[in-house]
Image (tube, rainbow, N blue to C red):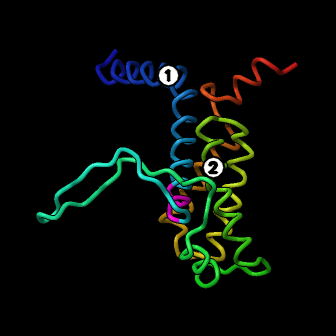
Amino acid sequence: MTMIHRLRAHHDMVFEWVSARLAPDILPVLARLTLAGIFWRSLLTKVNTSKLFTYTELINDFPVERARMRVPELPLDLKPATLHQFRTDFALPLLPPEWAAWMATLAEFVIPIMLVLGLATRIGALALIGLTLVIQIFIFPEAWWSTHALWLVIALYLVFHGPGRVSLDHILRRNFAP
């Protein structure tokens, strides 16, 4: 057996092991967390937030307060700039701007939580596919390859492959399925 054949055999053995043991658990979790993070950060631009774990950073000798984490203030309250944006830049046909703003905001609040927990993952991913297509078609049609195609691929992975074993969906199915 040549050196190339031995290297290929080792390569195949390592990647078969990784594919069998790690991919079924790691890839779905990473996909869920990535998609949740994208839409959660968008939520944080639409509502008032509270800073957690603040610290002060000196920038050009001026103190600037930073936060390691921001969370939405409850109850959710849309920023005036969000409503203005949905009345102008994000206006959708046939849907009042206030409804569109609240629908997008509530989806960006609830669905990322569902994805992190792995609860109703396929339904959440389908909803984010719909939201992504609305954003693509009506709001940012130029952003397909740079952004929206990636979101769609991640969401489609979750729809077709599910949330993985590290999820509430898996636990519920295992414990309560007939």
Quadrant in the rendering for residue 29: top right
The reply to whether the magenta stretch includes residue 120 is no
Give the dominant element type of the magenta stretch: helix, strand or loop: helix
Q: Secondary structure at mark 2?
A: helix
Nearest the viewer among 80 and 41 is 80
Across and down, in percent, residue 128 comes to 66, 55
Magenta stretch in the rendered image? 41-45
Q: Is 139 rendered above or below residue 152?
A: below
* Secondary structure of residue under mark 1: helix
Find residue 19 and report its horizontal and vertical position in percent: 52, 26
Q: Say above or below: 1 vs 63.
A: above
Q: Which residue is mark 1?
A: 16
What x and y, as percent, mark residue 170?
Answer: 70, 26
Q: CA distance from mark 1 to mark 2?
A: 25 Å
Label 2, on which residue? 155
In this orientation, which residue lies closer to the viewer: 139 or 9? 139
Q: Is residue 108 left or right of residue 177?
A: left
Nearest to N terminus: mark 1 or mark 2:
1
Q: Nearer the viewer, residue 166 or 4?
A: 166
Q: Residue at x 75, y 81 (%)?
A: 93
